[in-house]
Image (cartoon, rainbow, N blue to C red):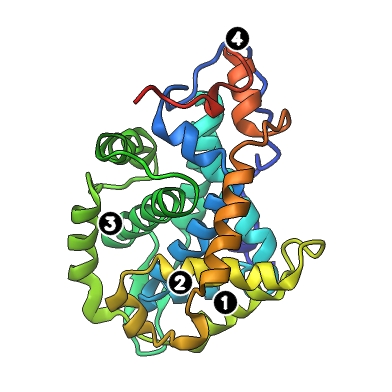
Amino acid sequence: MNQMSKPPAAMAIDFTRPKGETALLAPDSVQWRVFKNPVAMAVGGVAAVLLEFADARIRSGVWDHSIYKVDPIGRSQRTGMAAMVGVYGPASTARRVIAGVGRMHAKVAGTTPKGEAYRALDPELLNWVYATAQYGFLTAYHRFVRPLSAADQARYWREGEPVAALYGVTETPKSEAEFLAMMEALLPRFEPHPINIEFLDIIQSGRAAPSVPRFLHKALARAAVSLLPPVVRTRLDLGADYDLTLRDRMMVKTMARLADRVKDRNAPAWQAAERLGLPGDTAWRRAPA
C-alpha cells in the first residue's frame, strides 16, 4: 500500500476526553454551530472537492497519492473527521491529528498529466484547499439550513485561522469577496476533467449511505454543484444535468433544517460540550440576534 493511502493514526477520536481540555475554537463560535450539521457538511464538502479538483495539481495529487479512487467514501469520511477534530477536538488531539496530515502531505509530489510539477505543501495549494472547505461549509449552511448574518459570516471566516495555521496555510480569506479574489487568481488553471464527473457519480450513487434513497443523493450532489460560483461551473462543464430543481432545493432544505434540530448525543459537538462541562446541546443554541 502506498504510504499516502494510510490515514492519520488517530482517526478514531475521543471527543469526551481529557475532561476540561479546550478545543481550538470556542463553543460560542459560529463554526461550532455550522459544523454540527451533517447535511451542510456533506453538501459543502462535495462543493469544496469540486473547487479543488478544478486545479490539475490538486486533482492529480489526490487521485495519484491517496486511496480516493478505490475508497472515496472512506477517504471523505476521514477528511470530514479531521475537520471535526479541528473544531471540536481537544486542542492537543487536534494538533496531533493535523500534524499527521501534514506529514502525509509532505510526501505528496508529482507531475500532472500535462507535465506540471506539484507539491501538496505548496502554499498556493494549501491556501486554496483550506479556503474551499471554509467556503463550502459556510455557504451550504447559509443557503440550506438558515441564513447567517453578515457579522456571523465575518466571524466564521476569522475563527478558522488557528486551525489554518496548524495546516501551514499562509493566506486565509476574511470574507467571501476575498475567497472569490483568490479563486480569480487560479481561474485560468481550472478545466473540465472526467475525474470530476466520476466523483459526482460516486456521490449520486448513494454508496456513502445506502439506506438513503438514491434520489436524495442526487439532490445533494446538485445542491453541491449549485454552490459553485457560476464561472467555475462553466469552466468545469457541469451542465443542465446538474441543475438544482425546485424539488431538489426543497428536499435538501428540509433535510438540512431537520438535521439542525437533531441533538445527537454521539455527535462530536455534543461530546465536546460535555468534555468542557457545558450542556451537551451548546452548539444547537442559537446565538442572540
- 144 sits left or right of 154 in the view: right
Which numbered tag is attached to residue 277?
Answer: 4
User: Where does residue 22 sit, x and y in percent of width and height?
Assistant: 50, 18
Separation of marks 1 and 3 at Cα, in angstroms: 27 Å
Separation of marks 2 and 4 at Cα, in angstroms: 39 Å
Q: Earlier in the sequence, mark 2 or mark 3?
A: 3
The C terminus: image quadrant = top left
Quadrant of the rendered image containing residue 125: bottom left
Residue nearer the viewer, 169 or 186: 186
Q: Earlier in the sequence, mark 3 or mark 4?
A: 3
Q: Earlier in the sequence, mark 2 or mark 1?
A: 1
Give the residue at mark 1. Answer: 200
The residue shown at (55%, 55%) is 253
- 41 sits left or right of 123 in the view: right
Give the residue at mark 3. Answer: 123
Look at label 1 and name its amino acid: Leu
Q: Check if mark 2's residue and mark 1's residue have beta carbons within 8 Å.
A: yes
Look at label 2 and name its amino acid: Val
User: Where does residue 86 sit, x and y in percent of width and height?
Assistant: 49, 36
Give the residue at mark 2. Answer: 225
Q: Earlier in the sequence, mark 4 or mark 1?
A: 1
